[in-house]
Image (spheres, rainbow, N blue to C red):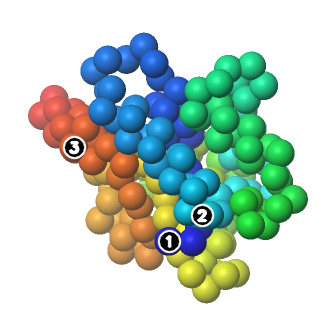
Amino acid sequence: MDAVIVDTNVIVTANDADDDDREDCRERCQDRLQQIRSHDEKVVIDNEWRILEEYERNANPNTKKGIGDLFVKRLLQNLGNPNICITVHITPSDENETDFEEFPADNALSDFDPDDRKFIAVAVVYENVHQQKAVLLQAVDSQWYGLREALVKNGLEVEFICEAYIRDLYERRAER
């Protein structure tokens, strides 16, 4: 694996020291963020900072010292270093900039969270430009888990860091 796209919930979960119910998931997210650095995986974001600004709203890279905070701080310090951070251009198709031309035109994904569409668009563009996939890292969003087959069908690769947790969450919500 050469490049990854990190959903914000991975960063938030890695920083979440107060939630004992997700301790195993928190440790997995912390480990995965540290692996990105030690294995020289590149982090892919959009060139308009939609993803990075979301990271900054959900982490404290200048004050706190959680693993997620340090991850965001490292990205901010290395935006110009293509060995650490790669930016790609995604094209908004609405004025809210929550839908993108690069997002797959698949009815199975029509209800996909607008706030998360940027991650998918970045993955599509990265593969088109670099001729290789960037793996989408997901921690706790059960919607992604429920749409995993549609994501794969559209050529996307998702790593569910906390798969047992997210599967249980998805199944509980499906029972309602």
Mark 2 secondary-structure assignment: loop
Q: In this rendering, would 48 be left or right of 70?
A: right
Q: Is residue 121 visible?
A: no
> Along the horizontal axis of the image, is 20 left or right of 131?
left
Residue 1 image label: 1
User: Label 1: how many residues lie within 10 Å, few (<14), some (14-19) or many (20+)?
Assistant: few
- Residue position for label 3: 164
Residue at 82%, 62% in the rendered image: 81
Q: Earlier in the sequence, mark 1 or mark 2?
A: 1
82 vs 170: above or below: below
Taking the spot 70% from the left edge, 81% from the top edge, the residue there is: 129
Name the residue type under label 2: Glu
Q: Quadrant of the C terminus?
A: top left
> Which is more N-terminal, label 3 or label 2?
2
CA gap, disc 1 and disc 3: 22 Å
Q: Along the line of sight, which residue is nearer the eye, 13 or 145?
A: 13
- Crowding near pointer 2: few (<14 within 10 Å), some, many (20+)? some
Q: Nearer the viewer, mark 2 or mark 3?
A: 2
Q: What is the quadrant of residue 56 in the picture?
A: top right
Please state the horizontal and vertical placement of residue 26, each as a whole percent of the image.
40, 32
Left of 131 or right of it: where is 151?
left
Residue at numbered disc 2: 41
Residue 53 image-quadrant placement? top right
Dots 1, 2 in contact, CB < 8 A? yes
Q: Position of residue 19 (x, y in %)?
A: 37, 17
Does residue 89 lie above or below 56 as drawn? below
Dot 1 or dot 3: first in sequence order is 1
Q: Secondary structure at mark 3?
A: helix
Query: Which amino acid type is shown beneath numbered disc 3?
Result: Ala
